Image: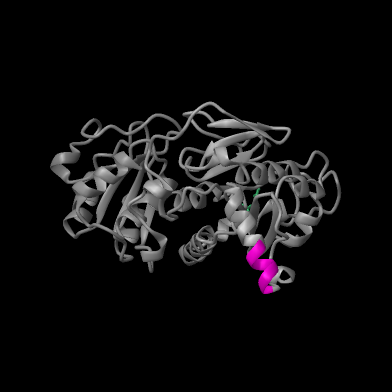
Amino acid sequence: MRMNPWRRWLTGLVLAVTGAVGSAQYAVSSQPNVVVLATGGTIAGAGASALNSATYAAAKVPVDKLLAGLPELTKVANVRGEQVFQIASESFTNEQLLTLARRVSALVKQADVDGIVVTHGTDTLEETAYFLNLVVRTSKPIVVVGSMRPGTALSADGALNLYDAVVVAASNDSAGKGVLVTMNDEIQSGRDVSKNVNIKTNAFTSQWGPLGMVVEGKNYWFRAPVKRHTGGSEFNIDEITSLAPVEIVYSYGNVPRTAFDAVGKSGIKALVHGGPGNGSVADRIVPVLRDLRAKGVHIIRSSRVADGFVLRNAEQPDDQYDWVVAHDLRPQKARILAAVALTKTNDPKELQRIFWEY
Ligand code: DGL
């Protein structure tokens, strides 16, 4: 999002007068300033040959090399990179989520930063995008991007995905739409999007559809999010010191209580039940979950089914059991929201409100 021309001119004047222009992180120009925060993943991956589109090492290429490989970016924005992590995203921890969000929050407060791009492994990209969507108080564009193929592969998708992410992050019309994800020419909501194919470049989709597309450096918008996010969120990373342990247990035919018992003893504050269908709970598991609830653990009923949403009091008497339903959030996103919500409340009715609103 561009600073207004007068402010930019004044900034330039101040920098020139104080002689700081030489050390300014950006040449003062009419272009937006975008910071790329790199965390690793396949977009920073490298394979042994151009034919290795699925066999490669993730998290190898440093952010400055990624940016140097995209000279076209200079026509879009003043871009600089920071290497926050260099990891495969399946290894992300809550602490790393907090560290990343704090860095994003600090940068968006800077007048000389107009947008943020986060490069990220695709495995947990949807979780990080949703987390940032919940806790970073800003209307400036934040775009999370990854790739399904390493840059060394034939038809690598990372370069265009990254270019598109910078275009979206540098665009005024991206402001106020929550955290966004650019993959495969589409602009997805960080809340809605999930990785639904583990080996194709069209991996990221949402059951509610993309918000728009970015084609040849131009955004085409068709929808805007209605759930609360970023500037409209009641959560603020600047006030969050830690995330409560919230774990997921999937359910299936013949499911034993073993995993529920083990996780229930680990000190969790909430358990996300990834049930079949509309979040169904096996009759032998109901007493196990009710016992956990009686011990103060919140039960969040989600579904292992990709699309649709869990209805309250449909498959289970949630009112009677004092359980929460995850609405349309899949277990991995329900875990993120539950952990964030528990930084504010331990009231199940408040938790349910939060699941309806976010
Ligand atoms: N290890 C996976 C990750 O970092 C690679 C998948 C990818 O980034 O596309 O998420």
Closest to the observer, 335 or 168: 168
Query: Can residue 330 be seen by looking at this rendering?
Result: yes
Examine the image and state in which quarter residue 38 appears. Answer: bottom right
Residue 166 is a magenta residue: no
User: Which residue is at 23% across, 51% downward?
Assistant: 288
Q: Is residue 181 left or right of residue 139?
A: right
Query: Can residue 254 be seen by looking at this rendering?
Result: no
Query: Which colour scheme appears in the figure?
Result: one colour
Closest to the observer, 346 or 109: 109
Examine the image and state in which quarter residue 302 appears. Answer: top left
Q: Is residue 142 left or right of residue 296?
A: right
Residue 14 is a magenta residue: yes
Q: Main secondary structure of the magenta part?
A: helix
The image shows residue 152 at horizontal and vertical percentages of 82, 49
User: Which residue is at 25% across, 49% downward?
Assistant: 351
Q: Is residue 286 above or below residue 208?
A: below
The image shows residue 159 at horizontal and vertical percentages of 75, 45
- Seen as rendered, the residue at the extreme right is 49
Q: Which residues are magenta?
A: 13-18
Closest to the observer, 351 or 66: 66
- Seen as rendered, the residue at the extreme top is 222
User: Which residue is at 65% across, 54% downward?
Assistant: 33
In the picture, the quarter occupied by the C terminus is: top left
The image shows residue 16 at horizontal and vertical percentages of 70, 67
- Report the number of discs: 0
The image shows residue 233 at horizontal and vertical percentages of 36, 49
